[in-house]
Image (tube, helix red, strand yellow):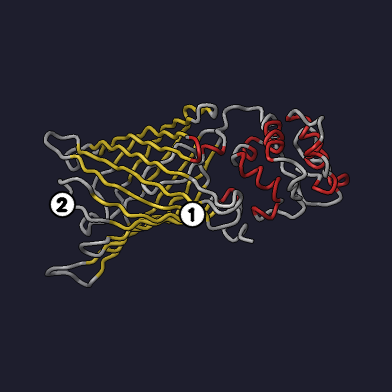
Amino acid sequence: MAGGPASAATLADDPDLQSPRAVYDAACASCHGPDGRGAPPKQLGFDVPMPDFSDCNFATREPNPDWVAVAHEGGPVRAFSPLMPAFGDALTTAQLRQAMTHIRTFCEVDDWPRGEFNLPRPLVTTKAYPEDELVFETTVAAEGPGRVETALIYERRFGARNQFEISVPFAWREQSGPGADDDWQKGLGDIKLGLKRVLYHDLSQGTILSVSGEISLPSGDTEEGFGTDSAMIEPSLLYGQLLPHGFFLHGQFGLGIPTDGERTNDEAFLRFAAGRSIVPGQWGRVWTPMVELVGAREMVSGADAHWDLVPQFQVTLSRRQHVRLNTGLRVPVDDGGTDRDTEFMVYLLWDWFDGGLLEGWQ
């Protein structure tokens, strides 16, 4: 948007601004153009490229509150150019939302899920929304023999509904007993490749539904306990639900199917996550407490189901909110989980589509 509080001092009281188109034309079109593609530089008087609101790949990614924050507080609130002025009291928040209603009409393709569905990422449950992210996650044994497992996860969105993913794990484990060469052993784990596709999304209902498929390659050293000796295929159904007052739900149901059934049993798993995003001061950092219930059971007669609780807390680190940190504990809660220990989990997430890792902090 453009215009600024100086040129729009009376807009909030203008009785003619009663429609989304009227608000946009009065406050935004002089810089962003009547078609949302941006006015030419000669008209603007500066060389900063204007965003193209008709580009669905760009315009659908951020939720309305982020756009309203930039319009209300100016570009620096999200570490963008100060040439994007703050409307402040020149437009009411309701009027800014009206302008957003019109801006949303510039993307004419309904296939693109809106950024409102890009909910905070749980530690275990897979999201339904397709992403462009780099995630570095670590799991540390909080009890029992020492163990540190890390993974670098690269996620790339392609098209309106699809995502490709590759995960490269590495681990360190404390060695004990006779024959141990040293205190700690390290090794590469099983590399994972995955695809995700959105099947359905409806913002009016707050619902997104996707399907994903992942294959785990037997690249780890099985003798040292860093991998399995069979490839594993994991199809999943993914669900996301927006709820009032910042609450949300994630759900995932899937199967683990080994390519060599004689070495590893089939497994079914069920994962749920619930949380709430909290923004103190309306425009600032996002704090998101979440809790997950994670269950799994081998598909053989007499096998026990194992259940874990994963309380966690995510926070945005950068002003642009494209770098986030999440920490939590994975705690076994079933009686049959005597061979599983409590784990500390953490990840650092970089949404690289929104800017470089070192951008957007000031």
Under mark 2, the amino acid is Thr
Kindly report the distance in space between the C-alpha atoms of the residues bearing marks 1 and 2: 32 Å
Going from the N terminus, do you reach mark 1 or mark 2 first? 1
Which numbered circle lies on residue 338? 2
Q: Is disc 1 placed on a helix, strand or loop? A: strand
- Which callout, 1 or 2, points to the residue nearer the camera? 1
- The residue lying at 47 percent from left, 35 percent from top is 243
Considering the numbered disc 2 on the image, is that residue within a helix, a strand or a loop? Answer: loop
Sort mark 2 into few (<14), some (14-19) or many (20+) by Cα contacts within 10 Å.
few
Q: Residue at x 69, y 55 (%)?
A: 76
Q: Amino acid at mark 1?
A: Val
- In the rendered image, the vertical position of residue 310 relative to residue 150, given as above or below: above
Q: Which residue is mark 1?
A: 315
**Nearest to the observer: residue 65 or residue 260:** 65
To which quarter of the image does residue 39 belong? top right
Q: Which mark is residue 356?
A: none
Other-residue count near label 1 (Cα within 10 Å), few / some / many at <14 / 14–19 / ≥20: some
Would you place residue 23 above or below residue 83 in this image? Answer: above
Q: Nearer the viewer, residue 24 or 212?
A: 24
Q: Pick whichever, 96 or 161, lies toward us.
A: 96
Q: Position of residue 160 (x, y in %)?
A: 56, 33
